[in-house]
Image: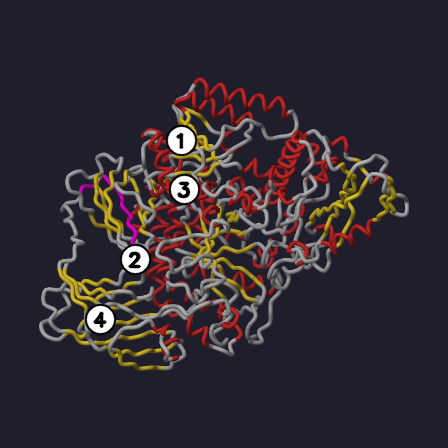
Amino acid sequence: MHKLKRLSTYANYKNVVASTFIVLAMCALQSCSSSQNSSKKNVDIQKTSPDLYSSFQNPPAQARPFVRWWWNGDKIKAKELDRELESLHSVGFGGVEINPIGMPAGPDNGDKSLVWMSDEWIDMVVHASKKAKDLGMITDMIAGTGWPFGGEFLKDDETCQRMVSDNVAYKGGETISVDEPFLINLYKEKYKNYRAQKHISERTTYKLSHVTLVPENCENANEVIDLKKHIDSNGKLSYKIEKEGNYFLSYGLVQQNFRDVTLGAPGGAGPVMDHYKKEMTLAYLNRLKKISERSGYPLSDLIRALFCDSIEVSGANWTDGFADIFYKAYGYKLDNWMPFVFYLAYDDYSKDKYSKKFTPEFKDQLKRVRYDYNKLLVETFLKNFTQTYKDFCEENNVLCRYQAYGTPFLMGLLDGNMIPDIPESNNWIYTVEMKDSIWKWKESHGYMLWNMHASAGAHLTGKKITSSEAFTNLHGVFKATLEEIKQHDDMNFITGINHTVVHGYNYSPPEVEFPGWVRFGTYFSEHNTWWEHLNHWTGYNARLSHVFQNSQAEKSVAIVGPTADVWGDYGLNRGKLQDNLGYLYKLWEPISQLGYSCEYINQRVLEGSVIKDGTISFGDMTYDLLVLASLKSISPEAAIIIKNYVESGGKVVVVDQMPTKSLHFKDFEKNDNIVKSTLDKLLAENPKSFIQVKEPKSLDDLLPWTEQILKESKIAADVLISNPTKKVYQLHQFTADKDIYFFTNIHRFETTNFDAKFPVEGKYPWVWNPETGERTPYYYASKTNELSISLNPLESLLLIFEDEKPSVKAVPVSTKIKDSKVLDVNWTVTGNQIDKQTFTWQMKELIDFSKSNDSTQSSFGGKIIYKTTVSNTAGFTHLDLGDVNEGVTELYVNGQKVGKRWYGKALYNIEDYLKKGNNEIEIHYTTVLANYAKSLKNNKMTIGWTKRYKDLVPTGIQGPVKLLTY
């Protein structure tokens, strides 16, 4: 990015940051108002917020991780709310998200469930918010209970609707004799075992929407016969097919009130609301005004943000008057197209069998109409729900925190993230093998893709915070380690997340037997063995979050995927959007590994961009390279933007083919011609501006494939890395006077070394340590922007280039081992289990406890203390504990604490602690609770969460323990 553009961009960004900082500070002290109002007076950030490093040392509440605070069954009492808030504050959390939810299966302590929005419940919200404020914490709140929003109070016409359809084969000469009850029963019986049908509400009603007759080899929509006009006064349809051939009867049924709130708490359970009706959204949100009416406090005095959980409306795809909305939007009626635009909630258009013999021309028209329908469905949702939700928050001076992803539909993944004040993603763990050597994610699930789109939404609209519901965990509740949390947390930062809301913390009174009430999550609980160490991660996370919240992202590559094509070819099903092109949504990985950066944008953003000097700008973001990833169709407006971009000097990577068609049905022939002629001419006149490639043959080829494209593009890297690997990712951000680089080695066992050359002039490299808050100069040999970097397993590096020259130049740190000795000693090992039992074992050889035949070892959960005596230590400087199976270790030498390691290599510098003669070594090792929880045979809660465990979790120090000399 050009230097002048960067300064201008940061000037704009820091105005937003300054306004946001004031708002969030007020939120923590007294009241909260909308922070993203662009009309606010521009204020220099340095005058409104502390120096970045000073606040890095002690991050404010808005940078610290929050918890999703499940108010289980709303069985809440003020005293317990106080205790839990104090506990969270003590380990470094900065805020809570109040989240009323259904009671988990487990012991009931007899406390009464309060009803959502009742006077008693409101009093508890006020009490918790005041207590949090007294502690310097921030309170957010979900706008309902469970998900999606709904409640027992909804009337039938206020509930969600889903259009379902099916076909019945007929032949020419046959007579169709059906009625509405027959078709309803036919559908119920046929689809009773399908996922979408098995989980419908008992209150679901059905109404016949349309019934048509379609020729098997249909050539155009005019051949579709509307049979509804042939239904007599008794509701009977009788129609003889006069012409020969094969036909199918297509019918559609509107399911009303088909979805229940998932895990709703009393008062907010029952039917799901119709998200496509603005008046319904407002009516639902207006219930929250009762909090102010009851308490006398404005909502903004109590909470920072209203939260909306993921959009999981089970395929709700219709609303009253949608056919009229469609006609007004596109100028043609949906009537004859109704047989073709609907699909099962968890399926897609590719599953239909009826269109196999349609002509190619008609199939092309179908794709366009389907695109029109799905696009309008998304736009209606975003306008009448998401934007209305945001407007309500703004009117009540609170922020809008919103998750745009969902299931089975993705309702505008980027556009939805561009609306709220705080776009939020969702990061999962234990959806893939967690014990592999290198970090992985489940592409078909999509959560890293959600991260990229949430952060893109924030970047494009100048929002300070991108949050994530982090460490969502259904398969390893008691397995998760602090090491795994750090590894996945670092990848959240790499993908643009700068605030963490952990999933989650359970309201659970102390008298409830172990493990307490567990609704979901990674078991952030005082009962967890690593709770006492958790402040190390919260501090690390908060310092990084603060830096990234108060700096501007830099992205050089803009990627446009074939979302529009997918909407027409498949529909809104998230599976097709996420894994239809295997390379597309993993492309950010090699781009980061190679020292570059990228943003996923869409055609609407492209259409609204400003083109200048071979760059694409939207809001504060400027991109130097455009990637068209396997697009077949594009809007004429976007084609013109691409033309202007290329003619101004820009370069385009075209994967698979250049788009040749337009999107919409209306005037498609004219618009196709505009797209094709514009891009064909552009390519012919500017062949050197295009890099045309086929998608990689396999994901194994993605890194070299991407490297070749970037090399050919000749755009500048964020950082030149000497030997890029899949082990190291990087992120680049900047302020008016600082360049910020974050590197992380996501390999659990291997150290990585590389040289890095940074496009920075006249600045000096400093390490800001997010674990300690310390700031130290980084060693450079001769040039301040040419550095050698070594990262231990799971180690990260926050490198800041600043104007200040260090008073003393840093010295290089040796990483070469000169001598080593394996400790061949006897160990006295004591196990202090979480249930207060104590065990003692004598060990000649260190073992993985999970493999032991001794049940006191294989089922152990708690703290293990290893003691031994070593001699002949002269000349050694370090102690390496070897394989510690991800446990937290604390080392004591001769009674003095050396330190603690909560991730990566358990390597300690003991040079200053050793003495001549014998030396006493004591290691405190904290396990996870998985094996202990698995051993509890009469505990309903632990049985429920551990029944999916295939194996016990490796536990204990395995070594070999070595003395080292560096």
The answer to whether residue 553 is left or right of residue 162 is left
Circle 1 crowding by C-alpha within 10 Å: few under 14, some 14–19, many from 20: many
Q: Which residue is the site of mark 2?
A: 749
Looking at the image, tell me whether mark 4 or mark 2 is earlier in sequence order: 2
Q: Amino acid at mark 2?
A: Phe
* Residue placed most toward the observer, 773 or 634: 634
Mark 1–mark 3 Cα distance, whole angstroms, equals 14 Å
Circle 3 crowding by C-alpha within 10 Å: few under 14, some 14–19, many from 20: many
Instruction: Give the residues in magenta.
Output: 794-805
Q: Amino acid at mark 4?
A: Tyr
Q: Which residue is the site of mark 4?
A: 892
Mark 4–mark 2 Cα distance, whole angstroms, equals 24 Å
In magenta segment, residue 797: yes
Examine the image and state in which quarter residue 295 appears.
bottom right
Tell me how the rendering is colored: secondary structure
Q: Residue at x 43, y 23 (%)?
A: 646
